Amino acid sequence: MSQSSDRSDTSDTSDTPGTSGAPRSDRGRNAAESSDPSFTAPQLPLAGVVVLDLTRLLPGPLAGMRLAEMGAEVIKIEDRGSGDYAREMMLGEGEAAPSAFWRLLNRGKTVARLDLKDDADRTTFLGHVARAHVLLEGFRPGVMARLGFGYETLARHRPSLVMASISGYGQHGPMSQAAGHDINYIGYAGVLDQLCDAGDAPIVPNFQIGDLYGGAQAAVQAVLAALVSAQRTGRGRWLDISMTHEVFRSNLVPAVAMHRQGRAPRAGDDVLNGGVPCYQVYRTQDGRYMAVGALELKFWQTLCDVLGRSDWKTRHWSLGQAVGAEDARTLQAELAAVFASATQAEWTARFAHADCCVTPVLRLEEAMAHPLFAEAREALVP
């Protein structure tokens, strides 16, 4: 979902309304205040900020949408032909483009079709740049410069412009021109190695850590900081957002183990990767799962009370139980047998009022219906 592209033709000069509606409301607003008819909602924090979004697929479009949700005017620039590849991706049977994938990532934006190799469209694009505060792009490193729109060129038209270039491996270095996807980025960063099953084999996560965190979130964070600087100094900057490097920099907990013992932990070797019974996922009678996060002793002892196993209360890593050792594995097996004796719904009800961090592992369709997400579920409705 995040492959850098050499394609740089983008077309149609007129802005057209985005198909996904206006930016979402400010979720920081107090609920009690919002129900007061005399309450005036505050202006969204990025109101007045103009963002040009030249990106495709997942990381850049999500970054642009997050800025739109904060009030920015986001103009998504696509080519005259197929446009963003996401328009045709993951279409349901009989579903017309644009896909739900594209719609989920581009709500609150307007769309401009521009061919950046056409003289008239290049002039139109520079007109957009002249009033923009932020430009997001995700072409393969060097493409913007070859188009004649490198940062130095754009900064002459708009000195305060913040340009974020999102790529797999950074704008410079031996892998800058390499193609990649999320699985490659987290693989290089030592993260995929930590997402392992009980047999210590890496899984294929359906949550794109490199794209979502290393690309979109890192870009938003850097853009917001650069906007503050530009507002203060009048000078923008070029942001090099390498998804692989951003994920690598955040691989903190395995790094602690590496510095302690000379290597990253294997599955079941450490506190947070299955080495203690109080922090584990357990299968229920109906083939579902419960997430046990009773990491602190007080939570573990409350869990023991709920299960009627006061004899387990001292078998905890904080009281000297060796992580990943025989007693931890034995107790984990005992706990697995207990959770296998009832359904997920029964365990959820049993722990509903117990303050010990034991919760169901929900499927997305269940999470969508859960009261917890009553005000957030619209984020996943295309």
Image (cartoon, rainbow, N blue to C red):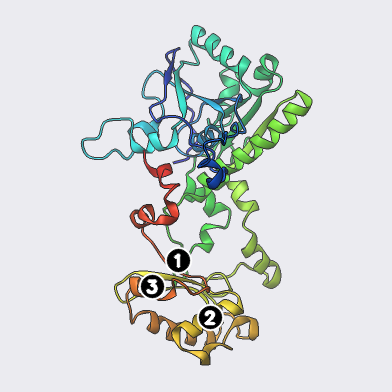
- Residue 222 horizontal side relative to residue 74, left or right: right
Residue 271 quadrant: bottom right
Task: Return the residue at label 2.
Answer: 302
Which residue sits furthest left?
Answer: 94
Judge the density around disc 2: few (<14), some (14-19), many (≥20) Cα neighbours within 10 Å: many
- Secondary structure beneath dot 2 equals helix
Q: Position of residue 273 (x, y in %)?
A: 54, 70
- Secondary structure beneath dot 1 equals loop
Q: Position of residue 68 (x, y in %)?
A: 53, 32
Q: Earlier in the sequence, mark 3 or mark 2?
A: 2
Name which residue lies at 53% across and 11% down.
124
Q: Position of residue 376 (x, y in %)?
A: 45, 47
At label 1, the amino acid type is Ala
Name which residue lies at 62% across and 15% down.
130
Q: Against 250, is 98 above or below?
A: above
The reply to whether residue 109 is in sight is yes
Q: Against 47, is 196 above or below?
A: below
Numbered circle sitting on residue 349: 3
Q: Depth check: 39 or 184 in front?
A: 39
Residue 232 quadrant: top right
Proximity of marks 3 and 2: CB atoms separated by less than 8 Å: no
Nearest to viewer (mark 1 / mark 3): 3
The quarter of the image holding the C terminus is top left
Task: Return the residue at label 1.
Answer: 201
